[in-house]
Amino acid sequence: MSKAHRSGPRRTRFAVAAALGAAIGTVLLSAGCAEKSDYPAKAVKVIVPFGPGGPSDVNARLIAEHAKAQFPKGIAITNVPGGSATTGTYQGVSSEPDGYTWIYGGTSELSSVLHTVEAPYTMDSYRLVLKVGNMPTVLLVKKDPRWPTLAAFIDHAKANPGAVKVGTPGDASFNRLMGEQLAAAAGINLVMVPFNGNAAVVQGLLGGHIQAGLVNSPDARAHVKDGSEIAGLAVFSAKRVASIPTIPTTREQGVDLVGTISHYIAVPKQTPDAVVAAIEKRLKPVLADPAYVKAAEAIAFEADVQDAAVARSELTRWYETAGTLYGKLGMLKKKQ
Amino acid sequence: MGIWHDLLFGFSVALQPENLLAAFLGALVGTVVGVLPGLGPAGAIAILLPITFGMNAPTALVMLAGIYYGSMYGGSITSILVRVPGEAASVVTSLDGYQMARQGRAGPALAIAALASWVAGTLGVLALTLVAPSLARFALAFGPPEQLCLAALALLTLPTVTGSSVAKAYGLAALGVLIATVGQDPTGGLVRFAPAAVPGLSRGIDFVPVVMGLYGVAEVLRTAEEWMGRSRTDKTDMMAVPRLSRLWPDRDDLRRSAGPTGRGAVIGFLVGLLPGPGNIVSTYISYVLERRLSKQPDEFGRGAVEGVAGPEAANNAATAGQLVPLLALGIPFSSITGLLLGGIMLHGIVPGPRLMSDHPELFWGLIASMYVGNVVLLVLNLPLVGLFARISLLRPNLLAPVVLVFCVIGAFSLNNSVFDVVVLMVAGVVGYLLHKAGYEPAPLVLGMIVGPLLEASLTQTGLILDGQWSAMLQRPLSAALLGLMLVAVLWPLSRWLLRLLLVREPAR
């Protein structure tokens, strides 16, 4: 003991530092390892910011159903609807950042809705894990020999400014903004009529009260089967959607405008890198599972897995575009 | 021949053990949900929808639909016994049902409600079986301009539901419409009248806590006032009433209920077909109609059995009517059928106009199960009449706190939000004050329910017709509805003028 003393304070200090360092290192390492190997140690709660039965809810449940091997403790879907989906999203971003609460969020509630609705979170309140897929906007019309194609439809609208009424699922909805962009790109005057959701748009279309409607692919799919009175003129995506292959894309018809509501998995901002990586590693094979992809296709949801960086840039770009569009429409929320 | 063959096939699906069990469970859960204030059919279906993920599609749909029409049976029970409508479609039932219970006729009121529900429910399904596809086309003709006329017509003719002061009734209906404008506008645009200082307001004011407050809490407050205002001996008096005169409806009750039930079934089915909250609005129409047709209109509001039979028949037939557009076209016209659509989508089936040919087991299985489910509900409800009727014998000082607790739990459970409890309490105080001032709050509820429809269709009509409101006259349906409105305004006016002239002549 006295020897040790004599051997000098310097060595002792070094030993202590080394021990401390090792200890901290071990703790850190083991913590890292624990998160990597132990995750998921319990069931994951996924917040869907919509009520049950809609495309978001159904798709989240399909993922949970096909994730049983990768998440043996289970994935529980919790529906928290309301406030243009901001209520559930906020509950998600403000939950414990331990990787056991995810947000199953769509394009609107993760970005553009923040322009129009007073919400207690921003785009910096969450971090993205993965992009799940798309449900592109589709232009539906009541079948009419005067407009068999998008080009003919645009010509008709050009010749009769203001005569074409286009139903949208809501005044501030994603599809309304797509409609405004289409009108601007084609130099036509379309009257946007807001309805309460996609189904109501189809209802107005079938009754002949509006000439066209902008809905998302799941609602388009049910009503454009052969023999229907409704036709799909264009799907706003780069390539055709597998479940509605007869509807040509906008680009095929010379209109360079694509847009889709996409779904993403997000977690609270403070979730550690290792946990996010663990989720990503386990979730990726689930989303690539052909059985899942096929089940999603049945509801016209297009699997399109992208990593967090791509997802973030998509959302940021849409946030900016939507801000400009809402600004032109005078719909931006008042600064407080 | 074809239809009967299809229906027989439907029964072969509906009578499979698991589907039979699903119909029974759905009916049972529906009854319970209807009884409990707060949690309505929409909430219950939303909660149970995920559970059906593991079932077959027909089984799931049979159960979810069972919850819906089952809740229409259960909703009347608390309306009659304690004046707390279990859901908005039984507000009107409470007007006369509760008075019947206070006169010791809770048994007949409950039994008539169950019987009328069964008859109308079955008639509604029969109509659904026979004429679904053709009627669905007709329902589609009701676009935004027609919906606007319907909403306006409802607000013009239905507030006088109780026959009290016209000014009071329309004032309350207008207030209801105003309350409905708080929060996000119905076509998903901007949030109105919701200062940031009151965070709950941005979601709007839900009519469920308002209904529970205006009726349930207000009644509790009235009971408490009466209780505390009495001396000790009087209190024993108050506890002694009412006595059950008899448990079952007599021949006279049944005779008087037959007409209202039949008419209620027709009204319910037709109004249920149209876009909007048909199951609620149809109860008001039925009540107003029965009061007009009655030889003793003064009895309404004082325990007229017709006022129970008609509306209860209407709301049950309306559930069948609301299924028509869903099954024939794949389009939900109301929020609850929207949830049922979700229940089907959960199984990878996206219902469209070809549901009947693509998935006959779903279409005919559901229809057949509704015949079965309505019988189940009758069997379930009639034996309970005796038990439930005894609730009306409970001492008010014991019953009132229980009602209050159930109302608070019910309001909180809607969104797990204290804000809804505050709404409940405010509505309770308002309801109490309204009663003191001689107002009956039913028109306010009507205004809150029709308001969003009025607002949305007004916006849409303006856009569709380019602001040319006269174009409504060129659409046959909206023109006809406008004509009806004119008659509704001129008829009482001309009668009033006529009476003025006639009274003046012979009097002097």
Image (cartoon, rainbow, N blue to C red):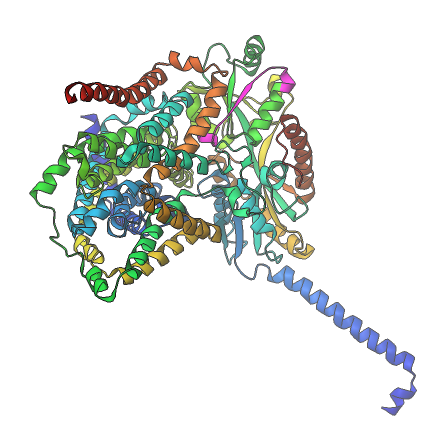
Q: As rendered, which of B293 and A7 lies closer to the eye?
A: B293
B3 left or right of A220? left
Magenta region, residue range: A184-200
Q: Quadrant of residue B192?
A: top right
Name the outermost residue toward the bottom: A2
The reply to whether residue A225 is in sight is no
Q: Quadrant of residue B238?
A: bottom left
x, y percentage for residue B469?
45, 16
Task: Determine the residue positioned at 87% across, 76% down.
Answer: A14
Task: Determine the residue positioned at 19% across, 44% down.
Answer: B303
x, y percentage for residue A188?
60, 15
Q: As rendered, which of B380 and B161 lies closer to the eye?
A: B161
How many marks do you count on the picture?
A: 0
Q: As rendered, which of B266 and B290 lies closer to the eye?
A: B290
Name the outermost residue toward the top: A159
Task: Determine the residue positioned at 18% across, 49% down.
Answer: B379
> Looking at the rendering, in which quadrant would you find the C terminus of chain A?
top right
x, y percentage for residue A303?
56, 38
Q: As rendered, which of A282 and B469 lies closer to the eye?
A: B469
Name the outermost residue toward the left: B251
B43 left or right of A38? left
Task: Determine the residue positioned at 61% across, 29% down.
Answer: A259
| Residue A193 drawn in magenta | yes
The reply to whether residue B345 is in sight is yes
Q: Name above or below for residue A272 compared with residue A287.
A: below
Q: Name above or below for residue B184 compared with residue A188.
A: below
x, y percentage for residue B169?
33, 35
Name the outermost residue toward the front: B508
| Residue B58 drawn in magenta | no
Q: Name above or below for residue B275 compared with residue B436.
A: above
> Looking at the rendering, in which quadrant would you find the N terminus of chain A?
bottom right
